[in-house]
Image: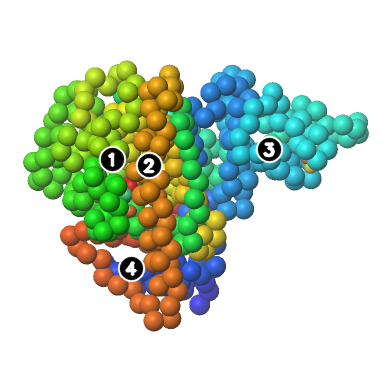
Amino acid sequence: MDFRGDVLRRLQNRKDGYSLEQAFYTDPDLYKLDLEEIWYKDWLFVGHDCEIPKAGNYFTLQVGDYPVVIVRDRQGSIRALHNSCRHRGSRVCTSQKGASAKLVCPYHQWTYELDGSLLFARQMGEDFDKAAHSLKPIACESFGGYIFICLSETPMDFAPVKELVNGYLAPHQLRDTKVAFESTIVEKGNWKLVWENNRECYHCASNHPELCRTYPEAPSATGVQGAADDPVISQHWAHCESAGLPSEFQMSPTGQFRVARMPLIEQAESYTMSGERAVKRPLSDAVKASHIGTLLLFHYPTTWNHVLVDHAISFRVLPLGPELTQVTTKWLVHKDAVEGVDYKLDELTHVWTETNDQDRRIVEENAFGIRSPAYEPGPYSPEHEGGVMQFVEWYCNFMQDRLRGKTSSLF
Ligand code: 3BY
Ligand code: FES
Ligand code: FE
């Protein structure tokens, strides 16, 4: 049987409610299949509008084998381009972020407009057709301060995600923020282990002392069961919805994304050691209520997020190898908030810097154990790991559809 057929069979025969077979977390061919069927075809969160506020501002990233540049053009639109020169393929933008009036390839100085069109190429002869050598465009959408791209030449319709999620994000005015701090860590484990760990709080009490001061351990907060008749959550939604903040649990039909606003513990408003706000200047002028908890958003395979009253935190997952994953965290505050006056950077970033490092160690230990020839898929806790089961089901269903050649109804 061919490789794809074999993977399809293994997905079909998988034991429901159990972790995946070892190969899904370690095998280079399965990793390549993940890249080809998910990362190269689906919508991916890449960064925020506020990171490129002016024409010519750009940032770069690497998705599998694809170098990508995200740039704001002269008209103010955000564009995604393949960062591969149309002369002989060199990377055009070589730094992580920058500002430039034109995109100039460092190899032979072919010069591109901010929209990717080729403006200038020295001594290429009479017949050279500049118009045929623009940087290749990548599908790109921005809403609510979030930029997503899709590397496929026939991207799936992104409107359902945009519409629903934008309603939740809009009051927070994330386009008017700035990145107060960002961190990038590399975790020695498959990208799916990073997600499995994120989708439960079964591990929180014994691993996250800082986070547990404010974030509820209850599976109703992290999982996918909605309010689950929890009166604290229902009351929280009523409080927030009456203040004009969409809050109720919503999940897409295929389970690819979820939004819900969850209460923090007791009177906590932010992820600090005291539970008090880390930033004096509120994140958004449009949010008048206090004690709004955390707006939780995940979108597989790239991002989970927390939007609070005083700041927001985004997380971006990118696969670097079969057993290597990059996690980039950004702390967003109002663009006029002043460090040292409105917030102290250490207070703002402490809880999640510690939490991320704790999660990195967890993922790496998980990966170690899974490499053992003695490893076999183990059972998820029905009470605490419903979110993990949901992620694994999404992954398996998505891959099965892809391997069967289905491309419709993928949200
Ligand atoms: O970041 C998150 O959303 C999840 C919630 C609980 C565990 N993990 C930190
Ligand atoms: Fe870019 Fe030659 S490879 S100018
Ligand atoms: Fe954790």
Q: Earlier in the sequence, mark 3 or mark 1?
A: 3
Q: Amino acid at mark 3?
A: Cys
**For the residues marked 3 and 1, what is the alpha-carbon distance in whole angstroms?**
40 Å
Point out which mark residue 350 bears: 2
Q: Earlier in the sequence, mark 3 or mark 4?
A: 4
In the image, is residue 136 above or below residue 38? Answer: above
Point out which mark residue 93 bears: 3
Q: Are marks 1 and 4 in contact (CB under 8 Å)?
A: no
Q: Residue at x 61, y 35 (%)?
A: 97
Label 1 element class: loop
Q: Earlier in the sequence, mark 3 or mark 2?
A: 3
- The reply to whether residue 33 is visible in this rendering is no
Please name whichever residue, 290 or 161, is drawn nearer the observer in this view of the structure. Answer: 290
**For the residues marked 1 and 4, what is the alpha-carbon distance in whole angstroms?**
34 Å
Point out which mark residue 229 bears: none
Point out which mark residue 273 bears: 1
Q: Are marks 3 and 2 in contact (CB under 8 Å)?
A: no
Point out which mark residue 19 bears: 4
Label 3 element class: loop
**For the residues marked 3 and 4, what is the alpha-carbon distance in whole angstroms?**
40 Å
> How packed is label 3: few (under 14 Cα within 10 Å), some, or many (20 or more)?
many
Q: Amino acid at mark 4?
A: Ser
In the image, is residue 299 above or below residue 181? Answer: below
